[in-house]
Image: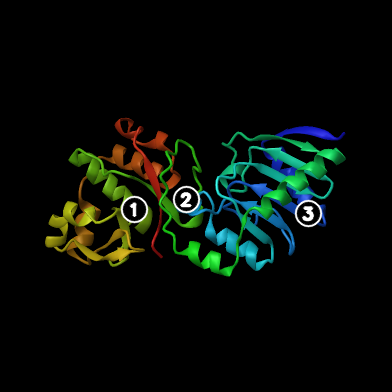
Amino acid sequence: MTTRFLTGSGIWEALRDGAATSKARCAAIAYLTSADALPWAAGDVLVVDASDEAIAAGATAAAALRALYEAQVSIHSLADLHAKVYVFGDEVFSGSANLSSSAQGPQRVEAGVLSRDPQVVRDARSFVLDLRNISVTVDSAFLDRIDRIAVRSRMKPSNKEAGEGTDHGCLWRLQTAPNPIQSLMAYTNALMQAQLGDELVAGRKFRLWSGTRGRNTFATHLNARRLEWHEGHSGYDDVFSITEGIGLTYFRERSVDENLRVKFLKAIETGDRRFLPESFTDQEMERFEKLS
């Protein structure tokens, strides 16, 4: 049979089999966050959207690109690429699946067509190679530059990349701190817990939200020495730590709305706005990296 329609796990079984048995691989894939989802080898050709916008949004991961570059895969960046075309030997798959952890998740509905028709395979290979010829080559200088781009997603994730953030040391937060005060307290505790652990830890640095708004919002805690402020990390975030003694005791023991805290925490960890408290489900979230 020269053509098959594939969905779900059938896509990844076919892609892994095709990649493993092929002597040459080329692909044009809009977004890539997983370097080891499929086997790649030196000389393989990969065209992705590694534009500054895609990197900043977390749609394509600089670390994954570097891993493939070090494996001597020929990588090229084409802004606004939306195709997902995989050409492995004598077969081609074209469909909806990016090369990311979320695309392989059981909650994601993906579909596509696998073809072994010789003319279709030739046309698909020519398509990928033509894109390579109009793309920017990803080299060490390119990678060094995008490594410095702050990952700050401006997407509106409903289940977009849900569950992917924590796999890469990333979480999600509201772009605007919530009101009223009981929501703000529950949200702040959830942000701390997601980064410091259930028991919280004194002295370990964490983020609250982007920019320098945190210093004004938490002036009372800073003045009372419950929190310590640190220089902004990566040029855009205030960074805090809980102080030993008075700060740790305060944040461990202060009373917050547990129902709100649990909902905020789930959304922070997954990026899925459906987990937010009902009055916040229409708010935008942004992706951010935990501090090591």
**Mark 3 residue type:** Ala
- The residue indicated by pointer 3 is 20
Circle 1 — which element? helix
Q: Nearer the viewer, mark 3 or mark 1?
A: 3
Counting residues from the N terminus, which is met first, the one under dot 1 or under dot 2? 2
Relative placement, left or right, of 53 versus 280 is right
- Compared to 112, does 39 lie above or below? below
Q: Is residue 197 visible in this depiction of the protein?
A: no
Q: Is residue 157 above or below residue 140?
A: above
Q: Residue at x 41, y 58 (%)?
A: 150
Alpha carbon separation for disc pair 1 and 2:
29 Å
Rendered image: mark on residue 53: 2
Q: Residue at x 62, y 48 (%)?
A: 99
- Determine which residue is flagged by label 1: 193
Disc 2 to disc 3, C-alpha distance: 32 Å
Q: Position of residue 265 (x, y in %)?
A: 36, 45
Q: Residue 243, image x and y in percent?
A: 22, 65
Judged left or right of residue 46, residue 152 is: left
Q: Position of residue 165 (x, y in %)?
A: 47, 50
Determine crowd level at label 3: few under 14, some 14-19, many 20+ residues with C-alpha closer than 10 A. some
Tell me which label, 3 or 1, sits earlier in the chain: 3
Residue 42: percent from left, percent from top: 73, 64
Q: Nearer the viewer, residue 198 or 158?
A: 158
Q: Which of the 4 image quarters holds residue 247?
A: bottom left
The amino acid type found where label 2 is placed reads Glu
